[in-house]
Amino acid sequence: MQRRHFLGTLAAVSVFPHDGFGQTSTSRLVAGVHRQQVLPAGYPGTEMWSFDAAFPGTALRARQGDRLAVTVENQLPQATSVHWHGLRLENGMDGVPGLTQAPIAKGASFDYDFALPDAGTYWYHSHAKSMEQIERGLYGPLIINEIDPPDVDQDITLMIDDIRLEQDGSFAAFDNFHDLSHAGRIGNLWLANGQIDPAYPLKRGERVRVRLINAANARVFTLGLQGFDGWVVALDGMPLNDPQALPEELVLAPAQRVDLIVDVTTDDEEAFLITFERDGGYAIAHFPVSGPSKAARSEKVILPPNPDFPIDLANARTATLLIEGGAMGGMRAARLDGQELGARELAGRGLFWALNGVAGRPETPLLDLSLGESARIGMANNTAFPHGMHLHGMHFSEVLADGSLGPLRDTILLNPQETREIAFQAHNPGDWLFHCHMLAHHQAGMGSWIRVSA
Ligand code: C2O
Ligand code: CU
């Protein structure tokens, strides 16, 4: 309300950068242990690992063009690191232990400090023992505001998750070979912002920006927003040039995000965020609606574009990525540290997946690119499970069947037996992880990397 009033009277302000444009927002995040009531009332609370004793952690907000400086202090019982998922930042700040930094030891801290070239919806999460640390709660939203943000009445971020708890509130065991070799760690409790079916009151006719972030270990959510009309305006943080009408179902793989700008159009008392599962649809958040307060707007919103790094498909370097392994997959052997090992030996070390015949992060990158060069990677999922492949540091486009390029993304879902091709311009120098964001799969071997040399 307040903000809209200001926008109406101070349109000129955005031309003159004022409160801190080009400056550094400074924060401190303490990774530690806290208790939270996650199971319904009446059940015991849960010991979470989290940032700033909150699950999800503090929402970090900054403005496009600024810098973000975050000191992460580790008060966990083990080493950690923080990855700023989806940000096209400098390599040394990417938070990958063993590739871009040393892990932050228990009791130590690390100063992250990076520029923010892109606006959009991102998230931050632990990148050490991620299957366990993210499941235990080490993640939070990272929102980079546009210099000239769209006019909305409310801006709601929903971090969708499913975690697996026991009846006593504790986390189900993590040393589970079934999770590692099948779909990953699928939860038994659906959460939005750490709560079961939370409520966000809205007024009829209001325009709402909804930022959906899939923070789950492995679940691919099929989501529906009921009681609204509007558009999908961004995917994985990146604005769509041509926003799409809100579809009935939005498929969100782990780590993917979608930004919606929607109007509350229902005549009912409630609107819903639904997850469609095999056996039906369930509300994972709801929106009590009151009003009428205002007439719904109808003009479509196009977010301002982020910096563009055009892809030269014709002259691109190419690579292929064969995804193998898992139960019912029949991977016979794979290389580990330069040695050929049989499936049984690999399983003994908790490894079940291979990329191009290598289990775990290989010594040499999948591609060694020069700055500015374009690349294409054809991927084949030769397994019985879905995988969400995520590239750090740069967004890519899918090369569609007709040869055109799809929207920019940082994570792409490959269903069983699917083949997909992605392309990108190597505009960001450094060593960038390229891995499955089904965290059990990454732990069990599905991780490669790409080098961009300046
Ligand atoms: Cu969301 Cu390798 O990260
Ligand atoms: Cu996977």
Image (spheres, helix red, strand yellow):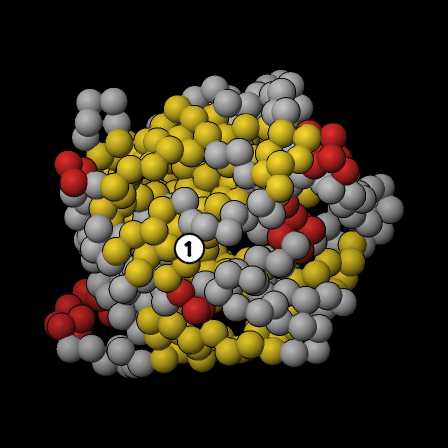
At horizontal 39% and vertical 24% (from top left) the residue drawn is: 419
Residue 60: x, y in percent? 47, 66
Whether residue 307 appears in this view of the structure is yes
Quadrant assignment for the C terminus: bottom left
- The residue lying toward the viewer, choosing from 20 and 261, is 20
Q: Relative to 280, say whether 61 is above or below.
A: below
Q: Quadrant of the N terminus?
A: bottom left
- The one nearer the camera, 155 or 439, is 439
Which amino acid, by three-letter code, is at mark 1? Trp
Residue at screen point 70% across, 36% down: 346
**Mark 1 Cα shell of 10 Å, populated few (<14), some (14-19), many (≥20):** many
Examine the rendering and report whether any part of residue 203 can be seen. no
Image height of 332 relative to 212, above or below: above
Q: Quadrant of residue 349?
A: top right
Which type of secondary structure does the marked residue at label 1 adopt? strand
Q: Position of residue 209 (x, y in %)?
A: 36, 49
Residue 56 lies in what quarter of the image? bottom right
Give me the residue at 66% from left, 35% from top: 341
Counting from the top left corner in percent of width and height, residue 216 is at 58, 43
Judging depth in this view, the residue of 296 and 282 nearest the camera is: 282
Residue that label 1 marks: 432
- Asked if residue 121 is positioned above or below residue 256 in the image, the reply reads below
Q: Is residue 384 above or below residue 387?
A: above
From the viewer's perspective, is 66 left or right of 287?
Answer: left
**How many numbered markers are drawn?**
1
Q: Residue at x 78, y 58 (%)?
A: 47
In screen coordinates, is 164 left or right of 424?
right
Left or right relative to 232: residue 178: right
